[in-house]
Image (cartoon, rainbow, N blue to C red):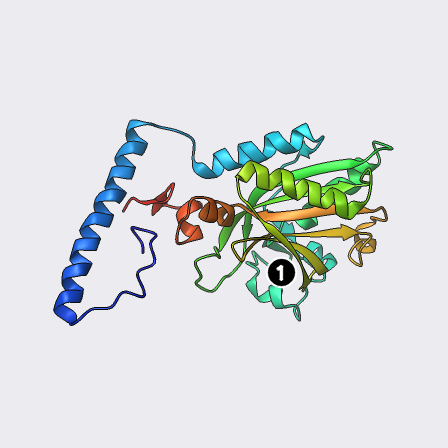
Amino acid sequence: MEYGDEDRSDMEFFDTAERDKQFAKLMSKTQAANDAGISDLIANPHRHDLSLLEAAIAEKLTARGFIEVRTPIMISTNALSKMTITSDHPLYKQVFFVDDKRCLRPMLAPNLYVVMRKLRDHTDGPVKIFEMGSCFRKESKSNVHLEEFTMMNLVDMGPDGDPMECLKSYIADVMDAAGLEYTLSREESDVYVETLDVNVNGEEVASGAIGPHILDPAHDVHEPWAGVGFGLERLLMLKNEKSSAKKMGKSITYLDGYKID
C-alpha cells in the first residue's frame, strides 16, 4: 500500500508459500511502477500537484470576485475561544499549543473572520476573500487525516442573493476546478452547529455554513455570509485515486504520490 494504491485485502491463498510468492511478484511490479513514475517526474519537471490544484482554484475564485489573503499560521488562544474551542471542546485536544497564549491554527476561520471584518470598513458592497494554507491538528492515524494539512477557505460577507444558493455555487466552482463529481448533505458540527458537507464517493471533502451565526457576535460580524472549507490533500487523494492523503501532501517521503525513500 505504501508503493501502490490498489486494495488487495480480499485476496485469498491456498497456503503461505503461495501467498509469499504472490506478494513478491506484486511487490516487484508495484515498486517498478513507482520507480518509473519518479523517473518520469525527473525527466518532465512540473509544479507539485497540490500547487496545481491551488492555482486552478485561485483562478476560479478570483474570476468570481474573491480576493486571496495570506494570514499567519500562529494564532492566539483567545482566537480559539472566540470559535468556542475551549478546554471542554472535542477539538481542543487536537490543538498544537506553542505556549499559554499561542497555538498553530487548527483552521483558517479565526483569521478570516478578522480580515473580513476589517475589509468591511472599506466598502459598502460584499467582502469576498479566500485563503489556502497549512493547518495543524493532532490526528489519529488515518488514510484521510494529516497532522499538517492544506485548507482552502472562502467567505462571502454580504452575498448578492440567497446565502445558501451562493454557497452552493461557490462549491460548484471549486469542485469544477478539482475535476470531481460530488453530492451535498446537511450534517451536525461541533463548531458550526450545522454544515452543508461536500462528499465524493462517500468521503467528506468540505464543510460549508451560512450566517448570521452564533459565532458571529464574538467577531463583531452581523451581516449574512456564506463560507466553505476544503481539505485539498483529500481532494487530490480522490482525484488521483490514491490510497492515502499523505501521498498528496507536504512530505519528505512522497512526491506527487510516488514513494521516494
Find residue 5 and report its horizontal and vertical position in percent.
34, 52
- Amino acid type for the residue under numbered disc 1: Asp
Find residue 138 and report its horizontal and vertical position in percent.
51, 61
Find residue 151 and report its horizontal and vertical position in percent.
57, 46
Q: Is residue 256 above or below residue 15?
A: above
Q: Is residue 73 above or below residue 119?
A: below
Relative horizontal placement of residue 77, taking residue 163 as reference (left or right): left
Relative horizontal placement of residue 13, taking residue 122 as reference (left or right): left
Q: Quadrant of residue 87?
A: bottom right
Residue in the foreground of this view, choosing between 218 and 44: 44
Find residue 6 and report its horizontal and vertical position in percent.
33, 54
- Can you say which quadrant of the picture contains the N terminus? bottom left
Q: In this view, does 57 lie above or below 212?
A: above
Judge the density around disc 1: few (<14), some (14-19), many (≥20) Cα neighbours within 10 Å.
few
Q: Which residue is drawn at 55% across and 58% down?
A: 96
Residue bearing mark 1: 100
Q: Residue at x 61, y 64 (%)?
A: 91
